Image: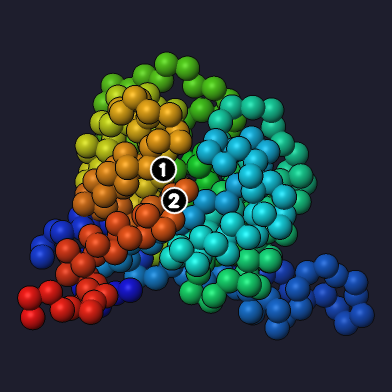
Amino acid sequence: MNDVDDESAAGRPLLSGSTVSRPSDPAPGAASCRPDAAAALEIAPRPLPDLARRVLVMGIVNRTRDSFFDEGRTWELEAAVAAGLAAAEDGADLIDVGGVKFAPGEPLPVAEEIARVVPVVAALRRELPAHVLLSVDTFHAAVARAAVDVGADLINDTTGLSDPEMAPAVAATGASLVLTHSVARPRQPCPRPRYDDVVTEVRDFLAARLERALEAGVPRERIVLDPGPDLNKSTEQTLDVLRGWDEYTAFDLPLLAALSRKDFVGEALGLPKEERLEGSLAAAAWAMRLGARILRVHDVRATVRMVRMLEVLAGWREPAGPLVHNV
């Protein structure tokens, strides 16, 4: 997807100046459910590509009965796998598999979350093209370890390391890690959130979590930051975060923008979630312009086309052609 080498940082604005060890093998004859050495090598986490002049589209697959947008349409295993394959066919660079929604609710046992997520990841790792990476949306270290064992490349922790074992677990697996700003405990409500300066407080939170991840051994080149639009934030606070998005490029790390069909889009336009595609695309384009390098979305095909057009405008990608107009 890249056409030109560039030394600019992964999080720089789009048009400014124009991305272990495992436990030892069991003894011969010992029973084990872990993959053998050859299989483990085949499914080792793959790094993110260079994101200096590239934006990745991350397609969402929720294996839940109560997910925000698809409302259980991908609950069945076959439906979840089919949705991941369809997203890749539409141009997704990553597939993000989740077994628990972010919104407040009763906790889900870790074993149940693993049972939801792992079969989807395993099937997609077998069936997807090699260039399509796999992400798992979880805040539990045990789920992260199980997912990486079967092929996940990236752990998307929307709770900012609420599990103290998450960063060490990801470091041990060699996977990449998304650090997201959110202030409430997992699945707990955060009514009427208050910030003195939301842009600065989000930046300081991300700085602290980045330091924690680095101290745990996660390589800097495998870390992505997400300012967390809508997560424990009002619409006005989210709009402030988006207006100040370029503040987060100072970390010189890839930035993930999870904006698709969110409440701030609906409240900005007065629209239900079913009618928020255009607003979501506009917000994504805005974030790209200010430095976002991964877009987490429900509408893969439309987002991919928008991204590719902006990449052409930025000079990062050649036009697909044929170039016959006025030639």
Crowding at dot 1, Cα within 10 Å, few <14 / some 14-19 / many 20+, comes out as many
Q: Find residue 238 and report its image quarter.
A: top left
Observer-nearest of 121 and 82: 82
Which residue is found at the position 20% from the left and 55% from the top? 13
Which residue is found at the position 37% from the left and 42% from the top? 277
Image check: 281 left or right of 157? left
Crowding at dot 2, Cα within 10 Å, few <14 / some 14-19 / many 20+, comes out as many
**The label number, if any, that marks residue 299 in the structure image:** 2
Observer-nearest of 301 and 322: 322
Q: Are marks 1 and 2 in contact (CB under 8 Å)?
A: yes
Element type at mark 2: loop
Which residue is found at the position 68% from the left and 38% from the top? 65
Compared to residue 243, the image places residue 34 above or below, namely below
Compared to residue 212, the image places residue 57 above or below, namely below
Image check: 309 left or right of 223? left
For the image shown, how many numbered marks are present on the structure?
Answer: 2
Residue 259 rendering spot, x and y as whole percentages: 38, 42
Element type at mark 1: loop
Quadrant placement of the C terminus: bottom left
Image check: 296 left or right of 65? left
Mark 1: amino acid: Ser
Mark 2: amino acid: Asp
**The label number, if any, that marks residue 260 in the structure image:** 1
Residue 118 rendering spot, x and y as whole percentages: 70, 57
Quadrant placement of the N terminus: bottom left
Give the farthest residue toward the top.
Answer: 192
Is there any visible trace of residue 209 in the rendered image? no
Residue 122 rendering spot, x and y as whole percentages: 68, 65
Which residue is found at the position 49% from the left and 55% from the top? 59
> How far apart are the alpha carbons under marks 1 and 2?
8 Å
Q: Earlier in the sequence, mark 1 or mark 2?
A: 1
